[in-house]
């Protein structure tokens, strides 16, 4: 999608952010916050002109207390730097939503970003102890803090987490960290069918196993990525790959590994093969290559980040494939199976209007399917401009009304990231190519271009 700003501001500290917000509020100027530029749903595009406020200069590390497992950083510190600071001090920051060098911590908080390790360790919001936020009409406010327990008031901090710049501008984030696990090993389980793969995920949980990651690839995705697999070639008959990571103490990892191997190697659910890659980093680079690999199959793709209840994952994947097939287009899916978080993808020729229209129609039916099965239209990349208005189908009318009342309480003039997240009526569906999972671009721009 495209937008045009009337001006761009690059404040140098949180006080300047609040001052810019104050000026915009005084002069009725729309304001769109922008971080690392990896937004995947058009959530940082000035559709109404106004001012784009870039937080890229707010890169300070205000506190690092390894002994207390905590870190206080400004908005534009990258995900990679947060992870590095934690790792260098024997700690861990688990959220890993992709594009780690580009994505900024405030953007991760604003979209409540996830990633593979969210299965065990939660999305970004689970790690946030407090926020410094510039709020209308132009003042800095601290929400939350380092207190181990605080139930004294409404949880305003959590309202800002996932708010996508529609309630306030996050200028700094207090993060809880954890001691890094002693050991971590990945296992790739290749199975003969999608149904068997999804059932294996459920059996993992029923057996009491708690992997930090339970990602999946369907057969179409696996076939495209098989030539670059870092190790012995996957079985040719595999229709599902389950990527598990086990972590904890060395003893815990050994026990979990034995239990997982016993679970997937016995009875009707027997795996075709189980690989333990010698280089975990190479495995994750391979996994991260799903997006460009699937784009290359046809020259373009349209992806949606959706969630099915994990017990209905198999049904959701099967019905998505049938929807795409009925429209005459190829589809594939991969994602975070332990949470039912699917990157549902239609492969298209970006120069073929028929295929683009078919992909758009598939997306509409997919969203309806997600709601029918009790899932969510957004799993880890936010709602943004692309999915605005779709929440009315997912929520009860009163719940939607309460969201709009909260928006009005924080932003009575409606100047903060207007027409993002809560707008009632969806725009024409967007295509996608791009970053860790999908970058959405306009239907017209999909012809011959990438964003």
Image: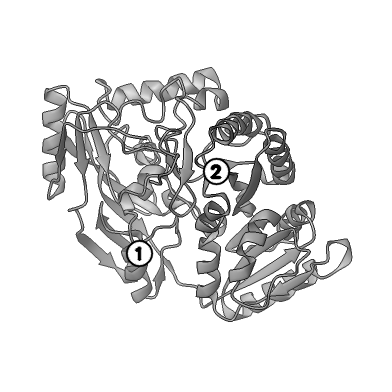
Q: How far is mark 1 from mark 2, CA to CA?
A: 34 Å
Quadrant in the rendering for residue 80: bottom left
Determine if residue 146 is in view: no
Residue at 28% x, 22% y: name it.
414
- SS class of the residue under badge 2? loop
The residue sitting at 51% across, 62% down in the picture is 288
Instruction: Report whether residue 412 is seen.
Output: yes
Give coordinates of residue 269: x percent, y percent.
83, 62
Nearer-N-terminus badge (1/2): 1
In the image, 85 versus 329, the foreground residue is: 329
Mark 1 or 2, which is nearer the eye?
2
Q: Does 129 sit left or right of 291 as displayed?
A: left
Q: Are marks 1 and 2 in contact (CB under 8 Å)?
A: no
Q: Look at the image and tell me in which quarter the N terminus lies.
A: top left
Mark linked to residue 349: 2
For residue 149, above or below residue 382: below
Classify residue 410 by image quadrant: top left
From the viewer's perspective, tell me whether residue 346 is left or right of residue 60. Answer: right
Q: In the rendering, at what x and y percent does residue 316 appear? A: 70, 40
- Please name whichever residue, 117 or 198, is drawn nearer the observer in this view of the structure: 198
Q: Which mark is residue 22?
A: none
> What residue does disc 1 label?
80
Residue 402 in the image, given as x and y percentages of width and height: 44, 22
Element marked by disc 1: helix
């Amino acid at each position: 999608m495209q937008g045009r700003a009337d001006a761009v501001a690059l404040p140098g500290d949180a006080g300047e952010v609040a001052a810019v917000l104050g000026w915009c509020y005084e002069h009725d100027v729309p304001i769109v916050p922008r971080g690392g530029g990896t937004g995947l749903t058009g959530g940082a595009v000035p559709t109404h002109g106004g001012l784009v406020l870039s937080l890229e200069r707010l890169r300070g590390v205000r506190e690092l207390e390894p002994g207390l497992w905590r870190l206080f950083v400004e908005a534009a510190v990258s995900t990679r730097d947060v992870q590095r600071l934690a790792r260098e001090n024997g700690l861990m920051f688990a959220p890993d939503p992709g594009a780690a060098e580009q994505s900024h911590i405030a953007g991760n908080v604003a979209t409540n970003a996830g990633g593979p390790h969210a299965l065990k360790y939660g999305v970004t919001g689970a790690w946030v102890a407090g926020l410094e936020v510039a709020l209308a009409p132009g003042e800095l406010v601290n929400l939350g803090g380092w207190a181990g327990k605080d139930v004294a008031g409404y949880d305003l901090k959590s309202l800002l987490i996932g708010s996508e710049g529609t309630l306030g501008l996050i200028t700094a984030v207090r993060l809880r960290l954890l001691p890094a696990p002693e050991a971590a090993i990945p296992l790739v389980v290749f199975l003969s069918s999608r149904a068997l793969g999804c059932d294996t995920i459920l059996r993992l949980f029923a057996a009491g196993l708690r992997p930090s990651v339970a990602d999946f690839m369907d057969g179409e995705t696996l076939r495209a990525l098989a030539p670059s697999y870092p190790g012995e070639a996957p079985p040719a008959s595999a229709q599902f790959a389950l990527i598990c990571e086990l972590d904890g103490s060395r003893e815990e990892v050994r026990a979990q590994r034995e239990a997982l191997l016993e679970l997937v190697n016995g009875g009707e659910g027997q795996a075709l093969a189980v690989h333990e890659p010698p280089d975990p980093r190479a495995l994750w680079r391979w996994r991260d290559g799903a997006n460009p690999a699937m784009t290359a199959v046809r020259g373009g793709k349209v992806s949606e980040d959706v969630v099915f209840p994990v017990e209905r994952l198999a049904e959701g994947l099967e019905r998505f494939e049938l929807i795409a097939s009925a429209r005459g287009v190829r589809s594939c899916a991969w994602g975070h199976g332990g949470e039912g978080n699917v990157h549902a993808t239609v492969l298209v020729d970006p120069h073929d209007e028929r295929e683009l229209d078919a992909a758009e129609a598939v997306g509409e039916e997919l969203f309806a399917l997600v709601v029918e099965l009790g899932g969510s239209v957004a799993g880890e990349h936010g709602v943004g401009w692309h999915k605005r208005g779709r929440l009315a189908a997912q929520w009860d009318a009163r719940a939607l009304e309460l969201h709009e009342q909260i928006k009005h309480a924080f932003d009575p003039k409606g100047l903060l990231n207007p027409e993002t997240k809560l707008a009632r009526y969806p725009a024409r569906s967007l295509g996608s190519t791009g970053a860790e999972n999908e970058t959405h671009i306009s239907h017209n721009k999909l012809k011959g271009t990438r964003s």
